[in-house]
Image (cartoon, grey):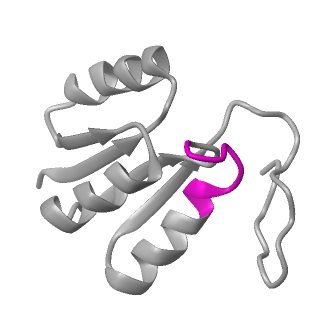
Amino acid sequence: MVIRVVLAEDNYLLREGTAALLSAVPEVDLVASADDLDSLLAAVSEFRPDVVITDIRMPPDHAVEGLNAAQQIRADYPGTGIILLTQFAEPPPRTPGRHICWGA
């Protein structure tokens, strides 16, 4: 079984390095990569991946775009798995009604 993946990361080196690692796995089909919220949502709509790997902080505001995208993707495509990544040691700003597990 091949897992279709969309990768979203605004840092070019991290995005391309992760893409290269994913592409080396025969069971993974990297169908698209994105560098901001809008391109992530467009890629998910177009390719309907099994899994989305997304940075938490991306353009345009570098705040919680990845979290917002995850929430929207789960609402629109409930069968899509989501993996959240970040390079920051501190949690993102809290927003009302949002709970995430940090540091696991």
| Residue at x 14% of width, y 59% of height | 47
Q: Position of residue 80 (x, y in %)?
A: 34, 71
Check the image and report above or below for 76 versus 26: below
Magenta span of residues: 59-67
Residue 82 visible in rendering = yes
Report whether 31 appears left or right of 41. left
Q: Quadrant of the N terminus?
A: bottom left
Check the image and report above or below for 89 versus 72: above
Could you tell me what secondary structure mostly forms the magenta stretch?
A: loop
Tell me which corner region of the image, top left, top right, bottom left or bottom right, holds residue 57: top right
Q: Position of residue 12 (x, y in %)?
A: 43, 19
Check the image and report above or below for 104 versus 62: below
| Residue at x 17% of width, y 41% of height | 27
Report whether 3 appears left or right of 81. left
Residue 38, magenta (yes or no): no
Q: Position of residue 23 (x, y in %)?
A: 21, 27
Residue 61, magenta (yes or no): yes
Check the image and report above or below for 58 versus 48: above
Tell me which corner region of the image, top left, top right, bottom left or bottom right, holds residue 41: bottom left
Report whether 35 appears left or right of 23. right
| Residue at x 20% of width, y 53% of height | 3
| Residue at x 56% of width, y 46% of height | 60
Q: Position of residue 4 (x, y in %)?
A: 19, 52
Residue 78 visible in rendering = no
